[in-house]
Image (cartoon, helix red, strand yellow):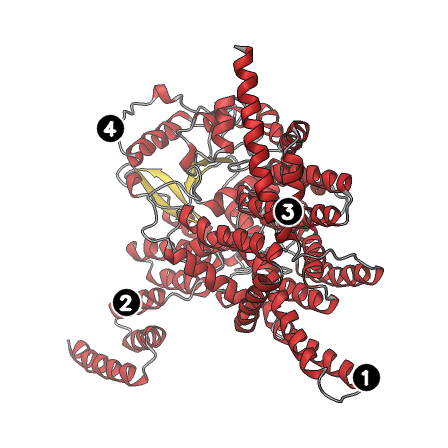
Amino acid sequence: MGGTKKGIVRALREALRRAVSRLSPVAERYYRSTAPYRLSSADRAVAFGLTTFFFLLYLYTCSHSPNMAGDSPELVAGSYSLGVVHPPGYPLYTLIGFLFSRLPFGNIAFRVNLTSVIYHTLALFLFYVCTLKITGSRVTASIACAALGFSPLFWFYSLMAEVFPLNDLFIVVILYTAIRSRERWQEGDISGSLRRLLLLSFLLGLSLCNHQTIIFLFPAALLIALQPLLHNLRKVRFAALFTTAFLLGLLPYVYLPLSASRGPYVNFGDPSTLKDFLNVVTRRYYGTARLWKGVSAEHRLDLILDCLKSIGSQARAFGMALGGIGAFRMARRRMGDFLPLIVAFIGGFVVFPALANVKLLGSFHISTIERFYLLPGILFFFFIGEGIEAIRQGVRGFLSKTPFRADVLRVVNWTLALLLSLPFILPATKTVTEVSLRYDVIGEAYIDDLLASVEEGSLIFVEGDVPTQLMEYYETCLPSRKRIYVVIYPFIFNTWYAKTLHKWYPDLNFPELSELPIHRGMSMDEMRLIYVQYIVASNPQVTSFHTLTRPAYLDEHFEMVPWGMTFRLFPKGTEPELGGYLARQLEFWQRFRPRGMDLSYYGYNRREYDIIPFFSQFPGELADYLAERGLRQQALRFLLIAYSIAPDPDYLRRIAEIYREDGNLREFLNFYALTIGLEKYDNQVIAEELLTLERALEGYGEE
């Protein structure tokens, strides 16, 4: 038996040696296109100066609050409390974020947001170095670095707590380490190349502890370091060391079960057991190998086109043209760089959309998916750098044939460099107004308004990413908080979440799932209704019960009365005393200040574009509630408040209808005209509709 095993090992080793011997000449030819580049002190000084500028720019525009984009509030809360955030858990980000959350300045949100400033600053530093090694030009690398640094998506995600800036840093760290291993090999430093190859293996494993899409970069890293890799693969000792280094990089995942065993408030999936640990790491709750769990997207081409559109908006038309030129030139001159970069680019640009599970239905979905375009976007900026160098070399070659003096040629070259950089620099004045989060207050404003809506000791049922994550931030990061209970609708039938509720709210009576009269044939809505009924009936000590939405399945059993920024649950057939209720709502909305709720401030790809209309529904629902009870003038007031938050023409239409029913035809006509003006832009059409309306009003007045 032992002899058979040895024979198999020998056969495998021999097959590997034959494969390596055949590939080695190919790798050698492949490497000839990539000459090493030694950094000078001037190169390092330029890199330091350039990235210092971007650090200060990002620091100035950084958010000081939990931002609504991405998963920022949850990541702040999870980092501060050493919790477990959504799959795959992001242990490395959480551990680093925890260290930053203990800095002795700023609030908690700003400290964790600061990590993204630093990650992207370091990413720009190494992007400059890698571009310099590829192009050999300090000027070209500087322009390409500035182009990436000023690009809207890269800049925006430098300003808030998110896992993608750390992922972007890993992209350039891995590429740089692979290039350094290749360069040492080319210079004859075999041991130095080997050490960097082992470091590369460790970094590959470590990067998986942050964001799993980094795997699209793995083939590129191995292709860059192909020759030292092939040489050392013949040695069993090296294969063992390479594997060990990779596994050591995965060690931060040990944090997940250790953290979960403490029972933190942010404890998604509770990976304290092996089964739950694997469920979290493989993203079972979101759909393994997919972005979201659920019905598959009908088309994948729409995501590819959306990715192309996103890269185009970052690089702009000029950058897209340069990127095409650069890719062509790099394929001809430096196949050793082109092949790895194009393989990784195709992974992020084509393969990822084929695996993702997103339908682009609105700004929420666009803002969710666009963060994943940072990886192919950064790779494309390497091609832009090569394109810039192609233009500069072409002009330089042309000028070398002219009789101009050297000093004139230098002026022309610097002028050309300036002209090449302006299309990336000039839009920055507009970009800063689009991406800056320096005065980002809407997240904290929402928390304040929500808490002002409810009494001490109330329970709120929440759902949706933004409210859920903001409540996680509130529960973990605000020490002088009002005591409230938060129950997250979508998680209530998960065992791990039931354990969290029992631990954090021991004074409440939560049901065991076996106690509830639910069965497999029930819909999720029916099961949720039973759960809510149990909670309300079994916890008389709770001051009041609230929900952030009006689920239809609660209609038959509860009155859902608009209550500030919530809906308060009353038993069916009962309502609050109208006088006291109205006085309370008037007091709340008189104090209400719509901070950060100017829709014109946000782009089509910002979540606020969906969230602000959600906020406006509360005074709108309150207006309907009052109008149904004959308080029409008060209803008008709240409809105007709703319209001031989100200028939806439906609010004007409802105001016009109240005036029509009250017989105030002049105001009816005024508001109806505003409604038409908002919805249609053809003045002739508006005039015709108003004429028709006036004729109708004449008959209405006679009646």
For the point 52% across and 23% down, the residue is 506
Q: CA distance from mark 1 to mark 4?
A: 84 Å
Q: Who comes first in sequence, dot 4 or dot 3?
A: 3
- Under circle 2, the secondary element is helix
Whether tag 1 and tag 3 are in contact, CB under 8 A, the answer is: no
* Residue 56 in view: yes
Q: Are marks 2 and 1 in contact (CB under 8 Å)?
A: no
Q: Residues within 10 Å of mark 3 (few under 14, many from 20)?
A: many
Q: In whole angstroms, how far apart are the C-alphas of marks 1 and 3?
A: 42 Å
Q: Is residue 82 left or right of residue 12?
A: right
Whether residues under marks 3 and 2 lie with C-beta atoms below 8 angstroms apart, the answer is no
Residue plotted at (34% across, 33% down): 528
Q: Earlier in the sequence, mark 3 or mark 2?
A: 3
Secondary structure of the residue carrying numbered label 1: helix
- Percent x, y for residue 184? 75, 47
Q: Circle 1 is placed at which residue position?
A: 407
Q: Is residue 399 left or right of residue 621?
A: right
| Residue under pointer 2 | 657
Q: Amino acid at mark 1?
A: Asp
Where does label 4 land, which residue?
521
Name, please, the residue furthest toward the bottom. Answer: 403
